[in-house]
Image (cartoon, rainbow, N blue to C red):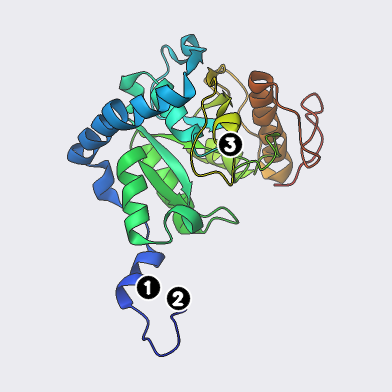
Amino acid sequence: MVVEPEGRRPSPWRKEYRRDRDLPWARSPAARAVRSALLNFVIGPVFRYYGRPTVFGLENLRGLRPPFLLAANHSSHLDTPAILLALPPSLRRRTLVAAAADYFFDEAWKGALVALAVGAIAVERERPPRQSVKLVRRLLSEGWNLVVFPEGGRSADGRLHSGKRGIAHLAAAAGVPVVPVGVVGTFAALPAGYHWPRRAQVEVHFGSPLFTDGHPKPGPGPGGLRYATEGIMASIQALTGQELAQDGAHPGSAGRVTAG
């Protein structure tokens, strides 16, 4: 329910917007052309000035065809442009970003802006409703890649926190590979709470795809999903070298249960 200031009637338009945040026009050919121009000529030059990015592991993407999930650590708003700009253009054109609905899609203008600029789609962070999960699965079935941040939000201290089981659930339900991505340096450039970046050396590392043909898929049930999620987070930690937060399982203890 939308709460309006006393004396004002709720806006029917806003209520409808909050119920259905998907913006399919942002995936149209025209919107994708605008997004490509923004990334190449606006966001890219600014990011390269502050981030001086270096990309590693592009060989792990060779021969990989959409759809697949890109699971990355998250410590800065710069993570999304860092990953998108590091992708080869042919893959970037088919890549969307799962964004927190409560943060980026709470207002119409903000949702439209991030959807156009980076291909964001709204996903609830806590217990995503069936509608959000259905949307993600449909987009994967249509051949879109999706950047997902399994931690569920930006790390406030730069450490790697435990992942949510949703990433393993999506991989199992959609039958798609997961590419672990490690982003280094964005926390130094723009940590949570800061509004303007500082210059820093940014690195983007693409790991070997998980759950590909011929490799084990996430097992059924909560136990199998926890095990798979821990494996994904361990792969990310191996790429970033981040210190693990207390809520995270040690990367070498795949059998331990983390918060999901």
Of the numbered discs in the image, which one, if any, rests on residue 2?
Answer: 2
Q: Secondary structure at mark 3?
A: loop
Amino acid beneath label 2: Val
Check whether the beta carbons of the residues at disc 1 and disc 2 lie within 8 A of each other: yes
Residue at figure coordinates x 40%, y 66% from the top left: 18
Real-space CA distance between mark 1 and mark 3, rounded to the nearest whole angstrom:
30 Å
Amino acid beneath label 3: His
Q: 126 or 182, which lies in front?
A: 182
Residue at figure coordinates x 35%, y 71% from the top left: 14
Residue at figure coordinates x 33%, y 78% from the top left: 11
Of the numbered discs in the image, which one, if any, rests on residue 15?
Answer: 1
Real-space CA distance between mark 1 and mark 2, rounded to the nearest whole angstrom:
6 Å
Would residue 89 be found to the left or right of residue 148 on screen?
left
Observer-side mark, 1 or 3, equals 3
Of the numbered discs in the image, which one, if any, rests on residue 233?
Answer: none
Circle 3 is placed at which residue position? 74
Q: Is residue 22 visible?
A: no
Q: 184 or 145, which lies in front?
A: 184
In the rendered image, the residue lying farthest to the bottom is 7
